[in-house]
Each structure stands twice: as C-alpha cells, then as structure tokens.
Image (cartoon, rainbow, N blue to C red):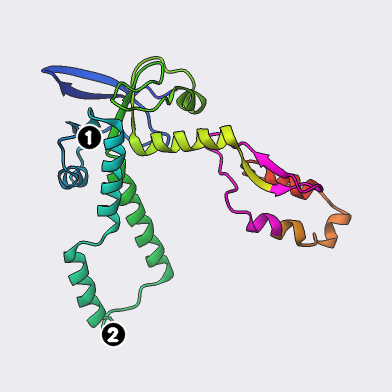
C-alpha cells in the first residue's frame, strides 16, 4: 500500500485516524459518521447523498445487506423523478432531442453519482488485513494479494472490499475460457485489477475468424492492454 492520506473521525470521545485507501483515487472523506446495525437504510441513503461517509461498526453481514439496500434506492427512480419523467414525455415534441454525446455524458454523470453514493459505506481493516467486526470473513489473503503489506490500519469502502474478495475467488478457482484439442477446459487465474474474460463470445469469434492476408508478410502486432492475455495466446497459435 502506497497511499499516505489519513482519514479522521471521532469515536468514544477521542479523535482517531487510519490510512485511507482507494484504488480509484477517491479523495479522503471529510465528514465521517459511525454506523451500526441500528441505522436504517433510509437514513444511510440520506447521509450518503449528503456527502457523509459511514464507518461501519456493526455486524459485517448486515453491512453487506445495507449496501444492497443502498443499491436498490440508487437504482430505483424516486416518485419526484417519475413525475418529472411524465412531464418531459408530454413535452418531448417541444424539447430538442439530445445528441448521442449528451446521452453519453448524462450516463457517465449518473454512474459517477451512483459510485459516489455506494462508496460511502466504509470498513476499517487491521494492519494484518483482518476485520474486527462480528461475522467478518477472513479477507487477509485477498487483501494481501491486492494491496501487499499494510504498514498500519486502513479504511476502504465496502464496495471495493467486496471487489477484492471476488477477485481473490477468481484467482483461486480460475475461470474456464477455452478448451484444448482434447476438450479439457483451459483455465486462467486473473489477479486483482486485471479484467477477466468472463464472456467467451469474442474468444470464439477470434478463434474462428481468418486473419488478414497481410499478416503473412508482416506479422508484427502490438497488443496493448492485454488483461489476462487470452487473446494474445489465441493470436499466437
């Protein structure tokens, strides 16, 4: 871990701090509130929308359920949005049609706001990558693979932590992407931060599509951003 920003909060009448870690480069949250099993999803959603991060001190599995509740609230249009949508439908013939660029920028803005809200639920990890919460899973190996050694306690978003856990499972069990000549599956073990080929349609497409004739005389190619390298292997076969 190479991020040296500190995240600070008050707890038990004392000022406390820990390293802040975000793989997406999100800045340290300034407003922190402790949260536990007594906090309702509506209250958590309101605080997250207002820019207050929630440092979880309750049961870990309840934190996961709370995150799912936040996802439902973010993805479900409010009644006000539905009313505005009906009004806009009625006046659609009067409004100028949005360009593809406008729609793209609107989608990016919505995704950014969604990620910001869902990233407000925080988990504190110990220097050995363990979590001191009830029913917390053993994430020491997963976090060690993703982050390396931790010099001290650190705080990350629960959403990022769940991504680290999923990446560890992919790395441990592997993902079948192709089959060899005998029909045995070829398995890759992607590490954290590497895009995994979870869809195989394009792999079959590359396998079955003839390469350009120009490659017979000039077969040099630059493969940039190879991820797990599956396409590179196919093209080299």
Q: Which residues are magenta?
A: 178-204
User: Mark 1: which secondary structure?
Assistant: strand
**Residue beneath disc 2:** 93
Q: Tell whether 124 sits left or right of 191.
A: left
Q: Nearer the viewer, mark 2 or mark 1?
A: 1
**Residue beneath disc 1:** 54
| Residue 126 covered by magenta stretch | no
Residue 119 x %, y %: 31, 40
User: Mark 2: which secondary structure?
Assistant: loop
Residue 207 x %, y %: 75, 56
Q: Earlier in the sequence, mark 2 or mark 1?
A: 1
Q: Which mark is residue 73?
A: none
Binning the other alpha carbons within 10 Å of mark 2 as few (below 14), some (14 to 19) or many (20 upward) gives few
The quadrant the N terminus occupies is: top left
Residue closest to the far bottom: 93
Q: Tell whether 135 sits left or right of 174.
A: left
Q: Tell whether 26 sits left or right of 54.
A: right
Q: Quadrant of residue 83?
A: bottom left
């Amino acid at each position: 871990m190479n991020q040296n920003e500190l995240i600070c909060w008050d707890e038990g009448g004392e000022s406390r701090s820990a390293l802040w870690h975000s793989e997406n480069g999100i800045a340290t949250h300034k407003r922190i509130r402790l949260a536990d099993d007594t906090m309702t999803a509506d209250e958590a959603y309101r605080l997250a929308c207002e820019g207050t991060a929630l440092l979880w001190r309750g049961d870990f599995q309840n934190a996961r359920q709370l995150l799912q509740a936040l996802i439902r609230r973010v993805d479900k249009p409010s009644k006000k949005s539905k009313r505005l949508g009906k009004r806009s439908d009625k006046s659609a013939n009067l409004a100028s049609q949005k360009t593809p660029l406008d729609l793209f920028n609107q989608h990016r803005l919505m995704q950014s706001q969604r990620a910001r809200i869902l990233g407000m639920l925080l988990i504190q990890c110990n220097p050995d990558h363990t979590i001191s919460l009830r029913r917390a899973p053993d994430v020491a190996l997963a976090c060690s693979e993703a982050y390396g050694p931790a010099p001290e306690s650190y705080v990350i978003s629960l959403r990022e932590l769940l991504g680290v856990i999923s990446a560890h499972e992919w790395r441990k069990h592997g993902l079948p992407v192709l089959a060899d000549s005998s029909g045995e599956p070829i398995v890759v073990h992607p590490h954290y931060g590497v895009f995994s080929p979870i869809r195989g349609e394009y792999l079959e497409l590359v396998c079955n599509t003839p390469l350009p004739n120009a490659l017979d005389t000039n077969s040099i190619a630059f493969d940039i951003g190879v991820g797990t390298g599956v396409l590179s292997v196919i093209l080299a076969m």
